[in-house]
Amino acid sequence: MTRVYITIDTEYSSGLATGSGPADRAENYARSIACLTPEGPAGITHKLRLFAEHGQRAVFFVDPMPALQWGVAAIEDVVAPILEAGQDVQLHCHTEWLAIAGAGSPLHAVGTGRNIGDFRFEEQCAILSYARDTLVAAGAAPPVAFRAGNYGANDDTLRALAEIGLGYDTSHCPALPGASRISLGPEDREPVIHQGVIEVPVGSIAALGGGQRHAQITALSLGEMTAAIRHARDEDRGSFTLVTHSFELINRRRLAVNRILRRRFNALCRQLGAMRGVTTATYAENPPEIAPASRPSEPLPAHAVRTGLRVAEQIVSNTLYGAL
């Protein structure tokens, strides 16, 4: 069985942070976590309902750093419904919150930076230890896996994760060279031991004209995602990682559901349930396994018709619903 990891980066928006009061936090929660719209919620509760309906497992990478601004209760509100639904909570981290929290932050001594990889090893250990402890204080089990905000990790991040006891990282995105500074390349598409942890690359497909396109709900069509998963299964690959975000099915500023993306995500959950030789999995129960070195993998080949259909759909989506 090929394990599909549906991973949801679950995060308040630092770009929408306006203050430290409860009203500011509630507004950010409504736009970034619950995604409350006139058509109903389209955030984590919507996704949790879909997973339950179709019997799917998922991994929510939750960012605890907003606790620097609003306290641990802000993270409890994120973690509680995920745990109640029996899904997996792992660790995410956006260091932009260090600048928002300012001098009153317990991490003020480490300075500020957009990405975790902008900090020295010792500073990363301090940031990641705070994030892990805050996630646990919010009710989650001790995490075993991590993804950096913006994929912005480096090799010191992996060493820091090993230092504080996390065994998995999934910040390497082969389709986005330069997003992280982890010393792996576009050809590294399978789980591998690297800098003391198991690095689990984000899934990808080959792109027309060269390069790759990452397996994110907003970046691939339904046909491309399902074809990529079937390709991984037929190539006997052990796992394939999909990425989405808590807010990805709406335009956060307009609080409007993107019906194209919602339909795409709903259909993905349904089709995964009917796909032979494939199962969805979590890091807590069935973590990814290291791929045999003797079996290099190739991404799903580029396909002009699939690409054309996706480009057309994306044009319609952007025209009707705008940016996230």
Image: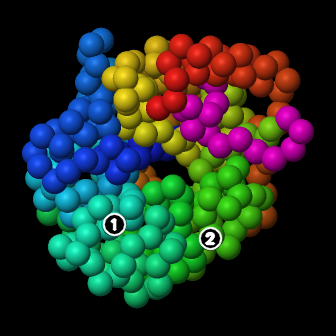
* Left or right side of 297 for 66: left
Residue 6: percent from left, percent from top: 47, 40
**Bounds of the magenta span?**
208-222
Disc 2 or 1, which lies upstream in sequence? 1
Q: Residue at x 27, y 13 (%)?
A: 38
How many tags in the picture? 2
Visible residue check, residue 202 = yes
Residue 122: percent from left, percent from top: 40, 87
Q: Residue at x 25, y 65 (%)?
A: 101
The picture quadrant where one finds residue 266 is: top left
Identity, as a three-letter code, of the amino acid under mark 2? Ile
Identity, as a three-letter code, of the amino acid under mark 1? Ala
Q: Residue at x 78, y 20 (%)?
A: 308
Q: Which mark is residue 182?
A: 2
Q: Crowding at label 1, few (<14), some or many (≥20) Cα neighbours within 10 Å?
A: some
C-beta proximity under 8 Å, tags 2 and 1: no
Residue 126: percent from left, percent from top: 32, 81
From the image, tell me which residue sits under label 1. Answer: 99
Q: Which mark is residue 50?
A: none
Up-down relation of residue 219 to residue 306 (above or below):
below
Report the mark closest to the observer, 2 or 1.
1
Q: Residue at x 16, y 53 (%)?
A: 20
Using the numbered discs, state the Cα–Cα distance from disc 2 to disc 1 in whole angstroms.
Answer: 24 Å
Q: Crowding at label 2, few (<14), some or many (≥20) Cα neighbours within 10 Å?
A: many
- Give the main secondary structure, helix, strand or loop, of the magenta stretch: loop
Quarter of the image that includes the N terminus:
top right
Q: Examine the structure image and report whether residue 217 is included in the region drawn in magenta.
A: yes
Residue 123: percent from left, percent from top: 39, 83
